[in-house]
Image (cartoon, rainbow, N blue to C red):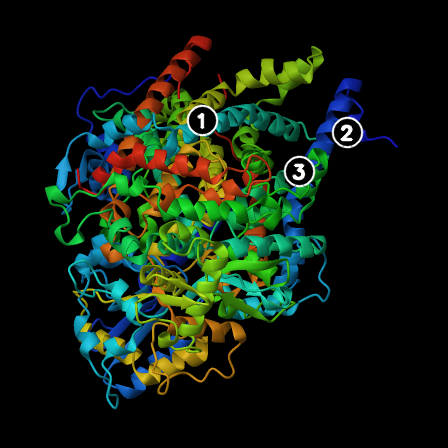
Amino acid sequence: MRKIISLALMGVMSLATVFASGCNKKNKTADSATDIEITFWRSGMGDEFMNDIVAAFEAKYPEYNVDFNSETTNTAIADNIMNGAKYNTVDLYFEPIPSNSLYQYLEPLDDILTMVNAGESKKVSEKVSKSLLDNYKFYDGKYYTLPYGGGVCGIVYNEDLMEGYEIPKTTNELRNLVFDLYTAYNKDNCKPFIYFSGGYWEYVYNIWQAQYDGLDYYYNTYSTLGQDVAVLGTESEKPSLDVLTAKDGRYQALKVLETLLDSQYVVSGSNSADHTTQQTKFLNGRAVMMCNGAWMNNEMKTASSTSKNFSIMQTPVISSITDKLTDVKTDAMLSAVIEVVDNVTNGKIAISDVKKADGTYKIGEVAICESDWNRIFEARNIIWENYSQHAICIPNYASAKEGAKKFVAFYFSDEAQKIMNNKTHMSLPFTFDKTENAPNVDSWSTFEKTMYEFSQKYTMVGYVEGRRSLVFTRGGAFDYAAVNFVSAMSQQSGAKSADTVWSEITKAFSDNWNTYLSNAGLK
Amino acid sequence: MKIKFLDRKSTAEKILYSFMFVLFSLFALSYLYIFFWGIVASLKTHTENVMKPFAFPEVPQWKNFKEVFTLFTPNDTTFLEMTFNSIFFSVVPAAGGIMFTAMLAYVTTKYKFWGSQIYYYLSFVVMLLPIYSSGGAMFKLIYNLGLMNNYLFVITAFGGIGASYMYFAAFFKNLSWSYAEAAFIDGANDWQVFFRVMLPQSMTMLGALFLLSWMGAWNSYDAQLLYLPELPTLSVGIYLFDFDMKYYVRRDLLFAACMVSSIPTLIVFICFNNIMMNNVSLGGIKE
Amino acid sequence: MSTMLQAKKVNWSRIIFVLCFILVPTINFLVFYVYVNFDGILMAFYRYDVNYNKIWGLDNFTMFFDELFHQSNGIQLAFLNTFKTFLIVLLIFPWGIVVSYFLYKKIPLYKTFRVLFFLPSIINGIITVIVYKNFVSVEGPIAMMVQNMLGLPEPPDLLGDPRFANTFVWIHMLWLSFPGDMIIWGGAFARIPDGVIESGRIDGASWITELVKIILPMIWPTFALKAIMLISSVFGASGAVFLLTNGDYGTITFSAWQYIQIRNNANNPNSVVYNYVSAIGIIVTLVSMVLVLLGKWAENRLFKDVDY
């Protein structure tokens, strides 16, 4: 027996030597100025469209050779960008926005924004969605990353099951809807909500927070924790714990969730299942609503479903915003104002039909002040977008830096944009004129059409990684102190109230504040 | 009916053995069930798998097994190549690593020289101290040594300090030196004593540690993923495929790939099980 | 015990022999461990300022003791769960010997059992976790059983509910570790001379007497070494927490906590979390070493002359 083992071992060892001496599989393409090596994260968008764009680029610029690597993992930047030119030959990444400690290895891409593709009249910067571009700006004012995709996110719903119910405009209306849906469908083993491991709810609760506090506060006070990012690190501009623990829109968002996440309203198992499992159940009628995003259709195209009709609703406005308003004090009034706001946004009525000479706004028989109108208008016209998951960047030491930039400029050309629109039925990061370049959406599903419409109509809100306080990006602080409140609130027994959760959050922030500062290098 | 095995046992023992037999059977069946479930799941559609995970398929999707062979090709590596890589990157490092460990443990326990004690303590530290992020140092080293995507990468496993060292050290310490003395008197030199007299006595030990080390290497994928992306093993393949199917939403294919990738493991194990199990042991017998 | 060789004069051939045997492992260790990890160990002793300059000191260590007493960051819970898990591991440690004993005593179908009991170690972990998750999912039979037992309105989310999550992480661990260390115990049993057992039989020893009084002392060196290695792994005790619950729902353990800390910062290779975790690693290693020395001392008191 032992002889058999020894013989087997010897056999494998000698085979190994043969292999080792002669075989060093696949040599990468040369690392030259004309060989562009791309690492691309294949997310829910898929990579078909990218293959076609690469082919179109190579046809147009035969002097370049593109080595396109599509990967299912998305940590390539973090894994190898610090290694430098000798060890890292990647010239161009399509991955989530890198940590801001890695910006020192990135090439500024501002010059791409001013480029005009051959045969076109617009600069690249004019073709990219403005709210996305604004949020990509680093705190030194430069663009080290540019968006390549992304999707509008919010509450997606099953149109068949929602028939006969009105789309809620405020969170109180949403709460009532959830109760009605529960009453109607519980007997059919169908619940108002499904989700996975607490995920995707941030698409709505972050928006509720921003609606309540206002976008200016959300971006410039909450995200920076009261610190002026331009003078980061100086003694006088320390981030503030008071901002982090202030009872702001986050608390109000928790109060809303408390009414929605009752265990009887959510599909059991939502706290432990993975996202495609839950999406499959959603497509097959186990729930009416699910927080999700534009990629859902593309991602789920191989799964069969009992319903094909899905759509997304504009995130309802947080009802407690009335705390911050002067004239609008009831939910009914808020809802009425929202209806007028929607009509203005959709071009059904002109702003001049509403705005009176004295600066007030006429809602039915009532007049409301301008600040109320502006707050509600802003709150109604923002929607969450996950653009920070889809960023283009180029290492500043890349050997094919110029070629990579040319590729990026080409990515923003009409030609490439059409390929992307047609293959993915997604439109971001592009913005279109009503008349030219807009994709032909006739063949798109209602879901995709709505997503497209929202992406062109609304202001997109997301994480501004490049300008967030270092307490978040380096310190280890997360929104809501990373407390898993979605599951805590939806437990079958011992479900936690918004107040309990909020006190846990503020305690965690206070306990860990010194750690955050120290981790961020601010202490 | 008489069960021969229970003939010579007392009533209490008969009850005990019957109980243990039932318990063993339950667990053994539960492990077999993994395969049964996996095969049934491979034959269902994705939606059937999610909506009715315990039902049989309405229409068996035999084409899944065909599809797996066309889709389950990470970095253009065929199934056969992955199987070869798996065997190579588990057998060679395990065998080499264990051999070098045995040699190190032998000289450091049986020969007294300056520093011989330090290997014991170093092994302890290596075993216990987790080290995170070597700042890309390992990556750069492997790259500079030309070991990236190279079968010679296995030399990184030819160490000897760590948990296995402890086992061998315990074994050799307990192994009587009188065998060696007798051999020395017969005129054997140090090499002959080790390879002809002492090492054969540790064969069972060697086998056991080889088996443990082989199993560990067979299922590991993190280092391979980083340093040998062009030479994927079955484990790496499954790891990447798991990610892939997350976005492609084809659990049925993931299960089919899992089942298919288990076949070489099972063949290797069934063939070698008896040899391994009958010849392995750790530590010594108290004398 | 063996007599150590002592060279009376310089024996060059012996020096060459020894050098040959230690050379490869030593070079390998110096190159692939010391050289590569040098910076990793130093990491415990510095942090960064805002411009990523290193600040040397023991801050990482003091921070750990400071944080240990904050309930909100989960370390306390992680340690508590780790110790609970370790208790379970301690309980199943002797169970492994019992399983191997019955296989050794050739329980019917022992050859088949021996093969099947290896399946958990050789099947890819991804597969076993998927099967287990399905089994305890809301669609599965276990959730329905728990629902009926407790009279719940819905089948419970067993891995997503703090009431059940820990139990079901442990059940997963027990399920897969039922066979114990068959390689180690089976091998040790195999080397016991048949005559010893036979004479015990003739003296009318029961199975438990046989196992405890005859077999255990025979395999004592293996047992002692395994026990010490078990003690040394106290801080590593953990079920498949990361794969089953991601450490949520009150299931976090120390090793899962470390892993998740690192993973959460996977996109930031400059994160100070690596430094912090390195420091904790050093503390835990020191504590483990003390425990191991205590364990060795205790074993030596129990049985004189034990060496490993």
Q: Quadrant of the N terminus of chain B?
A: top right
Residue A491, image x, y percentages? 56, 40
SS category of the residue bearing label 3? helix
Residue occupying image coordinates x 33% and y 57%: A75
Residue A380, image x, y percentages? 41, 63
Q: Which of the pair B99/A444 is nearer the observer?
A: A444
Disc 2 to disc 1, C-alpha distance = 46 Å
Q: Nearer the viewer, mark 3 or mark 2?
A: 3
Q: Amino acid at mark 3?
A: Phe
SS category of the residue bearing label 2? helix
Q: Amino acid at mark 2?
A: Phe
The answer to whether A186 is drawn above or below residue C35 in the figure is below
Q: Amino acid at mark 1?
A: Leu
Disc 3 sits on a residue from what chain?
B
Q: Are marks 3 and 2 in contact (CB under 8 Å)?
A: no
Residues packed near mark 1 inside 10 Å, few (<14), some (14 to 19) or many (20 plus): some
Q: Is residue B202 left or right of residue A461?
A: right
Disc 1 sits on a residue from what chain?
C
Closer to the chain start, of discs 3 and 2, is 2
Choose top left, top right, bottom left or bottom right for residue C22: top left
Residue B150, image x, y percentages? 32, 59
SS category of the residue bearing label 1? helix
Q: Would you name the residue on which mark 3 appears?
A: B27
Q: Is residue A258 left or right of residue B256?
A: left
Q: Nearer the viewer, mark 1 or mark 3?
A: 1
Indicate which disc residue B5 carries.
2
Disc 2 sits on a residue from what chain?
B
Q: Which of the pair A366/B91 is nearer the observer?
A: A366
Q: Which of the pair B274/A276 is nearer the observer?
A: A276
Q: Would you name the residue on which mark 1 appears?
A: C80
